[in-house]
Image (spheres, helix red, strand yellow):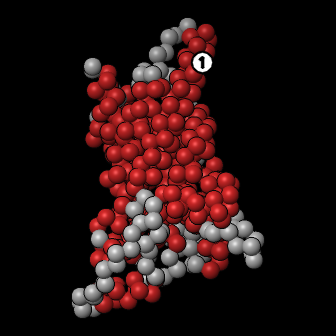
């Protein structure tokens, strides 16, 4: 992230990388959403993820694994572009001020001063909040589309039990079609009005720390494990593993908030009860679904796998674009 390229090019490269990664790992994202909302004890962990994949393909076909992909790609491109632009711009400003201070105090010229972890976190957080404020409506639409064709936990458990017994469970094909973006947007608006498109945004604000943590861990990785020119411009392979590990660590720290965000975005308005909040969702998960860590980390295995692949591919593609533009 120390490239001297303009923020607009950094933003474009980051958006392309994020969109590529999401398209590749999207089925895992859909499965993770289902794992985060299921109440079944059998449908947990990687075994549950495989069961959901098998069931979805058999009942609805492979295309069902990509329900909501179009709105997710739009959300990803918009969010990533705004994030990388804001982050690169703010980082450039802070770096120049830091270099100026070093030059005035010591007389030494530093082209790319190393920012502190607190500075990295602050810049990433500000950029994350700004980008998610714009992209959250598309994110909520995507989650709703992912859950349109879900089967019941009981049916899925029954199919998985027969599969484990080697009975070759048959799943009747269902021609139910995705209702589409317009239908989902209309449903959200009818339920809660415009504020429904930012449901759970308080959790989203806190989750803006995810890219901050990711970039901070990535900076630590670069300075601990890379040397010379690779420290400033990691190779695609180094960028992949560094970013994947960094994002996995960030995801593990913030996962309860990710769980709460998904459940809040899927919750429908109910006049007979008080609105769900981040704290009420986390309290329910802790008290009634296994406490810590099982309840608060339900579905984390699929999320970590998805984050590892997605963030790694994002950085790898971004580094390739940056290298290509630098040599053009």
Tell me the quarter of the picture where residue 167 sits: bottom left
Above/below status of 21 relative to 56: above
Above/below status of 310 relative to 148: above
Mark 1 residue crowding within 10 angstroms, few (<14) / some (14–19) / many (20+): few
* Foreground residue among 86 and 105: 86
Instruction: Report the number of discs.
Output: 1
Tell me the quarter of the picture where residue 161 sits: bottom left
User: What residue is shown at x 50% (from left), y 76% (from top)?
Assistant: 38
Quadrant of the image for the N terminus? Answer: top left
Q: Is residue 303 visible?
A: no
* Foreground residue among 303 and 276: 276
Q: Which residue is mark 1?
A: 97
Q: Secondary structure at mark 1?
A: helix
* Foreground residue among 183 and 298: 183
User: What residue is shown at x 48% (from left), y 57% (from top)?
Assistant: 181
Above/below status of 146 relative to 100: below
In the image: residue 8, left or right of residue 63:
right
Q: Position of residue 198 (x, y in %)?
A: 64, 53
Above/below status of 323 relative to 301: above
User: What residue is shown at x 34% (from left), y 75% (from top)?
Assistant: 175
User: What residue is shown at x 35% (from left), y 67% (from top)?
Assistant: 64
């Amino acid at each position: 992230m120390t490239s001297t390229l303009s923020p607009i090019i950094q933003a474009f490269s980051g958006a392309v990388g994020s969109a590529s990664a999401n398209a590749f790992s999207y089925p895992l994202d859909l499965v993770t959403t289902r794992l985060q909302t299921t109440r079944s004890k059998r449908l947990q962990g990687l075994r549950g993820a495989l069961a959901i994949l098998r069931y979805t393909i058999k009942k609805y076909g492979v295309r069902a694994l990509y329900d909501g992909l179009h709105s997710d790609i739009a959300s990803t491109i918009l969010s990533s572009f705004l994030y990388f632009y804001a982050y690169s711009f703010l980082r450039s400003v802070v770096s120049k001020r830091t270099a100026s201070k070093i030059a005035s105090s010591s007389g030494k010229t530093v082209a790319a001063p190393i920012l502190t972890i607190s500075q990295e976190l602050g810049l990433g957080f500000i950029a994350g909040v700004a980008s998610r404020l714009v992209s959250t409506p598309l994110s909520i639409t995507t989650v709703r589309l992912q859950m349109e064709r879900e089967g019941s936990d009981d049916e899925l458990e029954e199919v998985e039990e027969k599969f484990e017994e080697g009975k070759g469970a048959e799943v009747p094909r269902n021609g139910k079609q995705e209702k589409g973006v317009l239908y989902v947007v209309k449903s959200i608006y009818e339920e809660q009005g415009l504020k429904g498109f930012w449901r759970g945004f308080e959790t989203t604000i806190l989750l803006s720390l995810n890219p901050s943590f990711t970039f901070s861990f990535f900076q630590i990785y670069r300075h601990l494990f890379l040397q010379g020119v690779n420290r400033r411009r990691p190779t695609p392979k180094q960028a992949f593993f560094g970013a994947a590990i960094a994002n996995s660590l960030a995801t593990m720290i913030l996962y309860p908030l990710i769980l709460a965000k998904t459940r809040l975005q899927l919750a429908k308005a109910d006049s007979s009860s008080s609105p769900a909040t981040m704290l009420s969702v986390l309290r329910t998960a802790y008290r009634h679904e296994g406490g810590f860590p099982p309840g608060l980390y339900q579905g984390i295995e699929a999320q970590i796998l998805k984050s590892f692949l997605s963030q790694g591919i994002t950085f790898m593609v971004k580094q390739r674009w940056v290298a290509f533009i630098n040599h053009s």
